[in-house]
Image: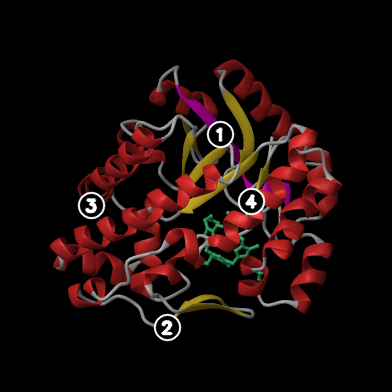
Amino acid sequence: CWFMRQAGRYLPEYRELRARHRMLDLIRTPELAFEVTMQPLRRFELDAAIIFADILNPLMSLGIELDFIEGEGPKIFNPIACESDIKALKRPQVEDDLSYTFDAIKLCVSELQGKNVPLLGFSGAPFTLSAYMIEGGKLGDLLKTKLFMFSQESAWHLLQERLIELIVPYTLEQLNSGAAVIQIFDSWAGFLAAAEYEKFVLPHLKNLIGQFKRATSSPLVYFSTGTAGMLDLIKQLPVDGFSIDWRTSISEARRILGPEKIIQGNLDPLILAGPESYLPAQVERIVMEGKKAGKFIFNLGHGIIPSTPPQNVAIAL
Ligand code: 1CP
């Protein structure tokens, strides 16, 4: 069992550190990223750690200018509007540009190895990263992204290819640095209809996963939310595991995804944030379903929300 946003704003020790440093400075200073990654592990008996970074900061190696604005969220200052914007993107020098995360991973792994706790590395998926690049920051209904997709199809596909040229070396170098698993976050995939997912997203994910799998035998997990209606498409992805949200039960996911794959999920983060009285029975229910389904990792269906009492995490464990 581990949680996404383990290191998030619900922990007072994170907020304390965050009050003294900008988000990007936390991410880009290996000692600070190490510290934030370790904070929840000092409090709770978690079975894995996830490296502290964001899905968006690697885009800076493509020449995307961004920041995390206080009280607002991520902002991209040079969003993508047309094919020439994509052609103007830089070719990423992943090892140099993103060395801060690789160094943070090395620091974490040397500390975690003795404790036998694996470290997860991660990346955003091409679709979800594209959505941020096109919308320019915090996402809503994905209006610009969808219009771009429908009206500039070849530019869309070019953008996916450029992102894959970043994601493949970025995730492989995280493994080289000591990460045990990679999770690919496609948090916004559920905003698409199945037909568009199949046409604009799935082929690129297959390409990405194919390149990854030819280079390494390390496990890969595909995370998505709101995709209950397209698990039969997602099932085609040759990854080792799928992280699902609370909109699908574990048993239903097992039925659709088949017996081989690892299933991770799927407690509603709002249940984790809710009253202590309601939580234990819901955790128990998911654990029982997971035991029945087999090959199961207990997790949240999405990240921990900031108002979650840390005590609730201890209860869930
Ligand atoms: O302190 C703060 O104000 C920043 C809050 C925060 C944190 C703790 C952001 C801003 N990012 C992160 C870290 C982060 N982001 C991790 C680190 C590992 C961990 O602690 O678990 C990970 C895995 C992410 C991944 C991420 N960032 C995703 C994919 C997962 C998901 O939540 O869907 C997404 C979509 C983002 C974008 C992002 N970063 C931050 C915010 C507020 C957002 C969402 C913005 C939006 O609404 O579109």
Task: Name which residue type carries label 4.
Answer: Ile
Q: Nearer the viewer, mark 1 or mark 4?
A: 4
Q: Which label's residue is closer to the chain start, 2 or 4?
A: 2
The residue depicted at 35 percent of the width and 55 percent of the height is: 126
Q: On the image, numbered disc 4 is attached to which residue? A: 105
* Ligand 1 lies in quarter: bottom right
Task: Name which residue type carries label 2.
Answer: Phe
The answer to whether mark 1 and mark 3 are in CB contact below 8 A is no
Q: On the image, numbered disc 2 is attached to which residue? A: 77
What is the magenta range? 261-275
* Along the line of sight, the residue nearer the viewer: 292 or 101: 101
Q: Which label's residue is closer to the chain start, 1 or 4?
A: 4
Q: Which label's residue is closer to the chain start, 2 or 1?
A: 2
Q: Is residue 225 visible?
A: no
Task: Name which residue type carries label 3.
Answer: Phe
Q: Which label's residue is closer to the chain start, 3 or 4?
A: 4
- Where on the picture, by quarter, is residue 82? bottom left
Task: Name which residue type carries label 1.
Answer: Gln
The answer to whether mark 2 and mark 1 are in CB contact below 8 A is no
Q: On the image, numbered disc 1 is attached to which residue? A: 264
The local crowd at label 2, few if under 14, some if 14 to 19, many if 20 or more residues have their Cα within 10 Å, is few
Q: Position of residue 198 (x, y in %)?
A: 24, 44
The local crowd at label 1, few if under 14, some if 14 to 19, many if 20 or more residues have their Cα within 10 Å, is many
Q: On the image, numbered disc 3 is attached to which residue? A: 200
